[in-house]
Image (cartoon, helix red, strand yellow):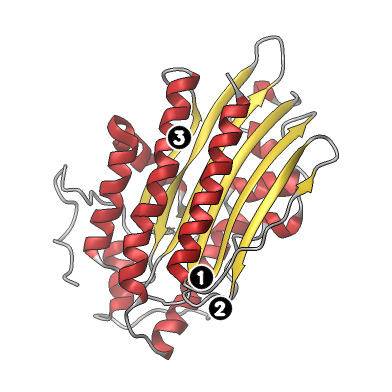
Amino acid sequence: MDIKAVKACFIDLQGSICAALEALDGAGRFSAERFDYPGGGCGQPRVLQDGQKVEKAAVQYTHSVGEALPAAASERNPHLAGAGFQAAAISVIVHPRNPYAPTAHMNLRFFLVDGALPAWHFGGGFDLTPCYGFAEDCVAWHRAAKQAAGRHYAQMKRACDKYFHLRHRGEPRGIGGLFFDDWTEGGFTASLRLTRSIGQAFMPAYAQIFQKRSALPYGTRERDWQLLRRGRYAEFNLAIDRGTRYGLQSGRRIESVLASLPPLAQWRYNHAPSPGTPEAELLSFYLRPRDWLGEAPADDQAAPSG
């Protein structure tokens, strides 16, 4: 396997995604930094803040070299604990300004573990976290996910629904997408091809939703709800997300590790939206694992209109 090919893929994705987000925003520009790590590798964080339509976006590339895998990276493969490794990753988070435009996330990663029998695997995926539900957006998002993952879509969708779940609240983070880990199926070349396909599908799928929803008018009510939902997003990233734990355990630059957090969020004690409102509909209908492509019997009522 060739980690150079993985690094080139992720660096190309970083450039294309940043360019696409700048075009969508129309005014904001990404910062450009590079940090060389003492043990080898580098970090290339790129962050857009206070844009016209994008309140905050982070598109981060890292290449890490370490003497021992952090616990967050070896907990599913304890036999690899303590092994030297290289890791390459790209992570993307977009927090729109308009509450009707959903938050979006993508992460792709590759681990190469040293030893007499080198071990490697890919992982990652993408998911969508709306504050307001639109059935057509959910269908379009999952249609793009299926096209990117092909025959692996159903497996990766189930894994996504399972992973992006706030266990302490019994609540999904969003409407899902794709998630895969410890992936070696078909060998290195096939795994890299699949990973690249998922990475290249993310921005076109998100852009069409972002453009449509960023044009909708909103007021104080929608903004307050957006900040409450961002609080849930922050809870997931800080309490559950393995990528955040990996970054903290591996001693990465803290500004980069926490760049996925929203710029503003709020928590309100025992808050519940009024029945029959779009906010209540998000919780009762959209934030439930379901088959958005109609390939299996529906587990609930038909999707609300809108």
Front of the two marks 1 and 3 = 3
Task: Point out which mark residue 230 bears.
Answer: 1
Amino acid at pointer 3:
Thr
The one of 166 and 304 positioned closer to us in this rendering: 304
Q: Amino acid at mark 2?
A: Gln
Q: Residue lying farthest bottom?
A: 220
Residue 127 x %, y %: 41, 52
Q: Are marks 2 and 1 in contact (CB under 8 Å)?
A: yes
Mark in the foreground, 2 or 3: 3
Residue 294, x across and y down, in percent: 16, 48
Q: Can residue 117 be spotted in the picture?
A: yes
Instruction: Please report the residue visible at 39 percent of the width from the left and 83 percent of the height from the top.
Output: 222
Q: Which structural element holds mark 3? A: helix
Quadrant, the C terminus: bottom left
Horizontal side of 260 relative to 158 (left or right) equals: right
Q: Which mark is residue 195?
A: 3
Q: Residue furthest right?
A: 38
Determine which quarter of the picture holds residue 135: bottom left
138 lies above or below 69 = below
* Mark closest to the chain's N terminus, 1 or 3: 3
Residue under label 2 = 266
Earlier sequence position, callout 2 versus callout 1: 1
Confirm or deny contact between disc 2 and disc 3 (CB under 8 A). no
Dot 2 falls on a residue whose secondary structure is loop
The picture places residue 10, in percent across and down from the top left corner, at 56, 40
Binning the other alpha carbons within 10 Å of mark 2 as few (below 14), some (14 to 19) or many (20 upward) gives some
